[in-house]
Amino acid sequence: RDQYSPEQWPGCANRLDIAAQWMDEAAVSTIHSWCQRMLREHAFDSGSLFTQTLETDHSDLLGEVLRDYWRLFCYPMHDDALNWVRNNWGGPAALMPRVRALFGSERPTDETREPAELINACLQERRQALVALKAPWLQWAEELRNICLQAVAAKAVDGRKMQARYFEPWFEKISAWAADESLEQLDIGTGFTRLTPDGMAEAWKGEPPQHPGIDAMAGLKASLDALPTPDAAVLQHAAGWVGKRFEEEKRRRAEMGFDDMLIRLNAALQADGGERLASVIREQFPVALIDEFQDTDPVQYSIFDSIYRIEENHLDSGLFLIGDPKQAIYAFRGADIYTYLRARQSTTGRHHTLGTNFRSSHAMVEAVNHVFQRAEKGRGAFLFREPDGTNPVPFQSVLSQGRKEQLQVNGQTLPALNLWHLPTDQPISSVLYRQQLAASCASQIVALLNGGQQGTAGFLSNDGSFKGVLPSDIAILVRDGKEAQAVRGELAARGVRSVYLSDKDSV
């Protein structure tokens, strides 16, 4: 208001009033449904079909395509390639989740060679690497065995850490492994650590022995784990072929899933006619607002960046992004904090902050500000501070409107934030930790509810009225289903019923 002279205020108020009345005329939708609408309404410019069926579950179609892949590429296999597929993939059903996880990845796919050829070439490379790795160990195993036997006989080692009954089986297994070209696995348990330079130094009373086998043992297990495997290349081939055929089948059937709405609109905007499509959408929606922007993924951001050219900040259109990185909880669904950071960088100098909390008490907001401001001094409250001091996600403290009541127990206002810890310095199991804190939580709730009935625990309003604590005033936030079950069990043991607001044990 201060940017306008008083005589302009009535006109400004009228425009705001009209805008508020027209709010119901705005197109309000999810990003997915909006993308579906754009594909349908701009079918010519987006290269889409006019009518497409939204299929919420494409599992059957994907399974059919995957079985086609199996028939085409796996049935003709034989010898090593067939054995590898049977041992590592099993069948189409077991392969499905692994292939689906690679959809959309940008890793290059070798389309010039079929899976059998990729597998055989990699297995040959693996054999050669394994032979080279084993080459010195037949001799080294015998030499190290003699070193250890002589040290035990001379009492030059700690008898608790180096005994023949420990190391004799190790060297027998190493010798058998080195002598058999087909044997890949080497299981010597603690021998992988005891026969290293650090392990030998720990067991030796004096100067530990020097031997190339001791030096090599430090990296032997890692070298075995790092042997070439066809898994990545062949999976990428499967994902590329299945993904392409899957898309072809969906288009042939005039079907699309939820993700297809985003992928197809984004592809259309990146194609040759993408700028025309973007200008048509901008003309239709000159102003757009995305709420909960921290939960968008890279594809969604690419769509809106292509349409509104966020960094260029054209004055004839507007895109407003409303989000809070502290509330980014959908990483499992593809939401990416780096998408938020990219948007924040593209809008440098055009940020606005809602600086007042209207929900919580003064004490609660002050406590949260205090915790985050302390964390901001180190690597940043969200661990994004760079060594040079730059911080793309700084914590910004807020003011508070406050509440009209205070939670009191026995006439004393409770602190807004309390940290609990178990009264022990000794390590305890996670099960015991969860059980004891759940018991403490349930006991505290029972005390508050009893106090609410007795008039000693409740909310004191500004006008002096007092309202006792009720069950509906209490909510318990947990990290997973195990914590929820623990708290519910402890409440039930105290005769307090509770409602679990989730239909999934993992949430």
Image: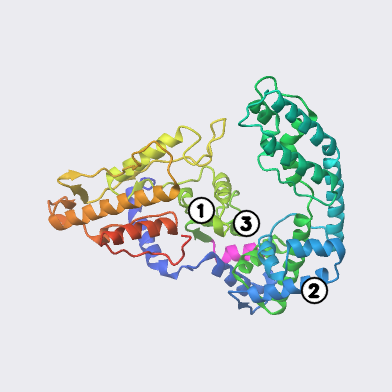
Query: Along the horizontal axis of the image, is 362 left or right of 4?
Result: left
Where residue 302 is drawn, which disc sits there?
A: 3
Residue 473, compared with residue 74, is above or below; it is above
Q: Are marks 2 and 3 in contact (CB under 8 Å)?
A: no
Would residue 279 be counted in the magenta stretch? Answer: yes
CA distance separating discs 1 and 2 = 43 Å
What type is the residue that disc 2 sits on? Arg
CA distance separating discs 1 and 3 = 14 Å
What type is the residue that disc 1 sits on? Gln
Question: In the rendered structure, which segment of residues is drawn in magenta?
Answer: 277-286
Q: Earlier in the sequence, mark 1 or mark 2?
A: 2
Q: Is residue 268 visible?
A: yes
- For label 2, the residue is 71
Q: Position of residue 26 (x, y in %)?
A: 46, 67
Where residue 109 is drawn, which disc sits there?
A: none
Residue 294, compared with residue 374, is above or below; it is below
Which SS class for mark 1? helix
